[in-house]
Image (tube, rainbow, N blue to C red):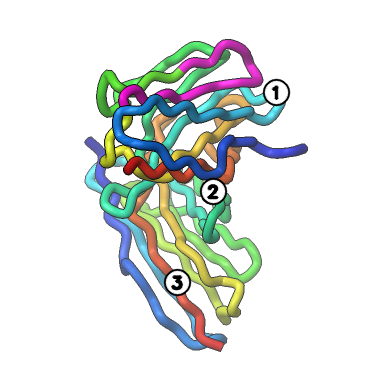
């Protein structure tokens, strides 16, 4: 089946630092998405990407849909303590959405 | 909009017992998805419905798992008999139409089978 490889598994950063995480796949996806999950809650959508090469920003978040349609990255600029959580990439083809294993982000004040 | 509502939030049961997880999707959403989250396997799609009809159940791990959607506002995921390896957080998500950005997840049910 389709496998998404997300890295890094975890990150410990200082408040104010920039963060970068990425996701690769052995298969092509039509849509890439990035979610954030807070403890005890379900994932919440951050950014959706629909076209190869697309670069999209949402506040301090920037994500790109790789030109090969097999990868995506998410950058967070000037991190703040409330950025802590688990970030998931997801690739979607029609109604089949697959998730990466997640990147656990810790931000030290 | 109350979002996707799941119940119970936590369930602890003994091995061999039947477990029923419940989900109320967002009104007007015609797709409903059941996911399971574990440390080892991450988020896995179990089954999804469109207009109350099961479309793809290839992710359901075994015959012990079954899901129903008797109407547009209610779905259940049942495990009978439950086993310790079923312990996980089970999420329900709903969506309107075919746009993947429309997914809304519930807060999940944390299941522990002892």
Residue A103 found in image quarter: bottom left
> Which is more N-terminal, label 3 or label 2?
2
Q: Looking at the rendered structure, which numbered label has been put on residue A42?
A: 2
Measured from the top left, where is residue A78 in percent x and y? 57, 81
Prevalent SS, magenta region: strand
Q: Label 1, on which residue?
A: B28
Q: Which residues are magenta?
A: B68-81
Chain letter belonging to callout 2: A
Q: On the rendered structure, is B82 left or right of B109?
A: left
Vertical relation: A12 (above or below) A2: below
Marks 1 and 2: same chain?
no
Q: Is residue A38 visible?
A: yes
Report, in whole angstroms, how far the alpha carbon at label 3 lies from the one at label 1: 34 Å
Q: Quadrant of the N terminus of chain A?
A: top left
Q: Vertically, is A99 above or below A59?
A: above
| Marker count (numbered) | 3
CA neighbours of label 1 inside 10 A, class few (<14), some (14 to 19), many (20+): few
Question: Under tag 1, what secondary structure?
Answer: loop
- Mark 3, other Cα within 10 Å: few <14 / some 14–19 / many ≥20: many
- Asked if the stretch drawn in magenta spans residue A90, the answer is no
Which chain is mark 1 on?
B
Residue at left offset 50%, top offset 66%: A85
Give the label on residue A105, or none. 3
Residue A69 lies, with reference to residue A19, above or below; the image says above
- Residue positioned 50% across, 48% down in the render: A49
Separation of marks 2 and 3 at Cα, in angstroms: 16 Å
Q: Are marks 2 and 3 on the same chain?
A: yes
């Amino acid at each position: 089946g389709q496998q998404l490889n997300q890295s890094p598994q975890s990150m410990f950063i200082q408040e104010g630092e920039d963060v970068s995480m990425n996701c690769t796949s052995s298969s092509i996806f039509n849509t890439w998405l990035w979610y954030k999950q807070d403890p005890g809650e379900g994932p919440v959508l951050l950014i959706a990407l629909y076209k190869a090469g697309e670069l999209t920003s949402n506040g301090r978040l920037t994500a790109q849909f790789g030109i090969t349609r097999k990868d995506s990255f998410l950058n967070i600029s000037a991190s703040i303590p409330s950025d802590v959580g688990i970030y998931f990439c997801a690739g979607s083809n029609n109604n089949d959405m697959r998730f990466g294993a997640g990147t656990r982000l810790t931000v030290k004040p | 909009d109350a979002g996707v509502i799941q119940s119970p939030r936590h369930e602890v049961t003994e091995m061999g017992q039947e477990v029923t997880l419940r989900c109320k999707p967002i009104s007007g959403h015609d797709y409903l998805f059941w996911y399971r989250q574990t440390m080892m396997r991450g988020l896995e799609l179990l089954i999804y419905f469109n207009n109350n009809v099961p479309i793809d159940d290839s992710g359901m791990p075994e015959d012990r798992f079954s899901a129903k959607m008797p109407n547009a506002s209610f779905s259940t995921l049942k495990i009978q008999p439950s086993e310790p390896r079923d312990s996980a957080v089970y999420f329900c998500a709903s969506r309107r139409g075919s746009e993947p950005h429309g997914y809304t997840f519930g807060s999940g049910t944390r299941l522990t089978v002892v």
